[in-house]
Image (cartoon, rainbow, N blue to C red):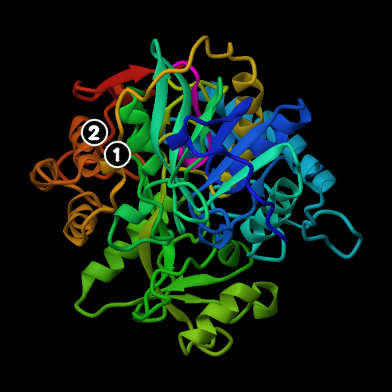
């Protein structure tokens, strides 16, 4: 698709791009938010730091969970989501997601996304861990994120009401009298070709920058998923929530080399792939919630030196998952003839910028959607394929809410330039997070991490210390049981304050 010539003026010369809504991040959450705003005839600026192929959405192999089948209902979907959340999911957020996800899937079809169909032309719905019904819509097997992102990005790129600010990093949020009124983006490229920075003014700013799972040494995420949106929001005074709740995907490829950590989608297990230990024996229910499966695999790997766990896919036609088959082939593995080695990896951050059910942060005018946000939906363990549904449901809600914000009364300079907080973590920090805030944590290890040089690592350690229990993906070996006092509680981090548990709903 051909890129449009940008029309934004250089902020350095006093110009600014003035729009009705600014969206930071061009994954599924950001793209859908922008397109929903366009339906209200709003002018949108879409700030994208990296090519679409580098977004976590682009690589998303899971599908979209929604109650679309005749034997399913939003109530059953909600029941499964609440069970997976281990007593920490925010029920109001769960009800919103499960009640609106099906409508969003149908909307994507109307926008041109083609989902996989069965022989009769009906949606082919998959079964994944923690779901009691087949309710996961896929596109091109395990390339759902790629297909949705391509479709939505084509629509945004050809819409004259969407100003694409590409290869640009949001480095500061601008506030006036405590309200977010825009942002400053730093642009890559030759200064002679375009300005070094661009100021975007808007009554509403939506962060959709993805999560922070690439902070961990072993991860399924692209390198840029290091919590940039969380850093921006916190610097502007927004509260963060549930930073200690990080999901580790059970089946990431464990082969060394460039494909190490490649995600082997849960849909493989839904279609019959099984996990086996060194003796070739099954040792876990493959479709149990992810926290259970990941811990079971980790226990097998720690039981014996050099132990390996493998995913046996020999009962599955590999042509149904072409990107998985291609990745395994590049690693010299043939899933048709031998099981492939797997191990858990950091995959999804349930925590993020604390928001309400319309994506509002604690800073007026600032919103967050997708993985960088925390509505409390996922609790302590995300149900498979609820994340893309979350991008759609809450992206649509955030677009409507942001467009209802009052226009800025006056231009105001940035309170501060927060670019320094966006530097990537050093290798030592990534090792420390994997060691001390991995699948199993201890008070001693978390205290070590709390002294790390990287601010977001310290914040993660502080919330993991504060949640002195084990719940879902948060496993404290020194506190092995869930504390009923913390049922329904979310640990909130506000600037300059220690994490504090708060009930949501």
Query: Which image quadrant for residue 99?
Result: top right
Q: Is residue 154 above or below residue 201?
A: below
Q: Position of residue 436 (x, y in %)?
A: 18, 51
Q: Is residue 397 above or below residue 139?
A: above
Report how many numbered discs are placed on residues in the image.
2
Q: Position of residue 81 (x, y in %)?
A: 54, 37
Q: Is residue 222 left or right of residue 105?
A: left
The outermost residue toward the right is 120
Q: Position of residue 453 (x, y in %)?
A: 14, 46
Q: Point out the stretch of residues depicted in magenta.
A: 364-375
- In the foreground, 436 or 204: 204
The circle drawn on residue 285 is none
The circle drawn on residue 244 is 1
Q: Is residue 359 above or below residue 31?
A: above
Is 495 magenta? The answer is: no
Is 372 magenta? The answer is: yes
> From where the camera sits, is residue 340 visible?
yes
Q: Is residue 423 left or right of residue 445?
A: right
Tell me how far mark 2 sits from mark 1, CA to CA. Answer: 5 Å
Q: Position of residue 344 (x, y in %)?
A: 36, 62
Location of mark 2 (residue): 463
Question: Looking at the figure, which quarter contains the N terminus?
Answer: bottom right
- In the foreground, 190 or 402: 190
Which badge, 2 or 1, is on the more N-terminal residue?
Answer: 1
Q: Residue at x 20, y 60 (%)?
A: 431
Q: Residue at x 44, y 54 (%)?
A: 191
Secondary structure beneath disc 2? helix
How packed mark 2 is, by other alpha carbons closer than 10 Å (few <14, some 14-19, many 20 or more), is many
Whether tag 2 and tag 1 are in contact, CB under 8 A, the answer is yes
Secondary structure beneath disc 1? loop
> From where the camera sits, is residue 137 visible?
no
How packed mark 1 is, by other alpha carbons closer than 10 Å (few <14, some 14-19, many 20 or more), is many
């Amino acid at each position: 698709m051909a890129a449009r010539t940008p029309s934004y003026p250089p902020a350095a010369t006093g110009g600014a791009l003035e729009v009705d809504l600014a969206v930071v991040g061009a994954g599924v959450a950001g793209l859908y938010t922008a397109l929903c705003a366009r339906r209200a005839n709003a002018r949108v600026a879409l700030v994208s730091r990296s090519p679409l192929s580098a977004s976590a959405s682009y690589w998303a192999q899971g599908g979209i969970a929604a109650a679309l089948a005749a034997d399913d209902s939003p109530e059953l979907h909600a029941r499964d989501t609440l069970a997976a959340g281990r007593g920490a999911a925010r029920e109001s957020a769960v009800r919103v997601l499960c009640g609106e996800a099906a409508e969003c899937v149908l909307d994507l079809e109307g926008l041109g996304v083609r989902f996989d169909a069965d022989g009769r032309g009906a949606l082919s719905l998959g079964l994944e861990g923690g779901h009691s019904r087949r309710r996961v819509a896929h596109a091109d097997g395990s390339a759902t994120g790629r297909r949705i992102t391509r479709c939505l990005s084509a629509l945004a790129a050809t819409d004259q009401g969407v100003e694409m600010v590409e290869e640009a990093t949001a480095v500061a949020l601008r506030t006036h009298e405590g309200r977010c009124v825009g942002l400053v983006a730093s642009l890559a490229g030759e200064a002679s070709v375009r300005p070094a920075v661009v100021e975007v003014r808007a009554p509403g700013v939506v962060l959709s920058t993805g999560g922070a799972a690439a902070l961990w040494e072993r991860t399924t995420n692209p390198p840029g998923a290091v919590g940039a949106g969380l850093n921006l929001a916190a610097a502007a005074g927004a509260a963060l929530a549930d930073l200690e709740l990080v999901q580790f995907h059970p089946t990431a490829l464990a082969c060394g080399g460039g494909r190490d950590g490649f995600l082997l989608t849960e849909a493989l297990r839904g279609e019959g792939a099984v996990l086996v230990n060194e003796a070739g024996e099954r040792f876990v229910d493959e479709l149990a919630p992810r926290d259970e499966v990941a811990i079971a695999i980790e226990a097998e790997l720690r039981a014996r030196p050099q132990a390996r766990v493998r995913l046996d896919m020999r009962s599955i036609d590999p042509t149904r998952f072409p990107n998985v088959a291609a990745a395994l082939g590049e690693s010299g593995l043939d899933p048709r003839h031998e099981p492939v080695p797997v191990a858990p990896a950091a995959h999804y951050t349930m925590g993020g910028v604390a928001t309400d059910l319309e994506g509002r942060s604690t800073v007026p005018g600032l919103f967050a959607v997708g993985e960088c946000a925390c509505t409390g939906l996922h609790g302590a363990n995300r149900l498979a394929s609820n994340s893309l549904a979350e991008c759609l449901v809450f992206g649509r809600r955030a677009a409507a809410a942001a467009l209802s914000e009052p226009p800025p009364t006056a231009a105001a300079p940035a309170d501060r330039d927060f670019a320094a907080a966006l530097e990537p973590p050093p290798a030592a920090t990534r090792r420390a997070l994997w060691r001390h805030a991995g699948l199993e944590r201890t008070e001693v290890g978390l205290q070590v991490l709390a002294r790390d040089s990287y601010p977001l690592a310290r914040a993660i350690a502080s919330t993991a210390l504060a949640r002195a229990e084990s719940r879902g993906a948060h496993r404290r070996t020194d506190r092995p049981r869930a504390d009923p006092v913390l049922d329904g509680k979310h640990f909130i981090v506000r600037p300059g304050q220690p994490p504090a548990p708060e009930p949501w709903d």
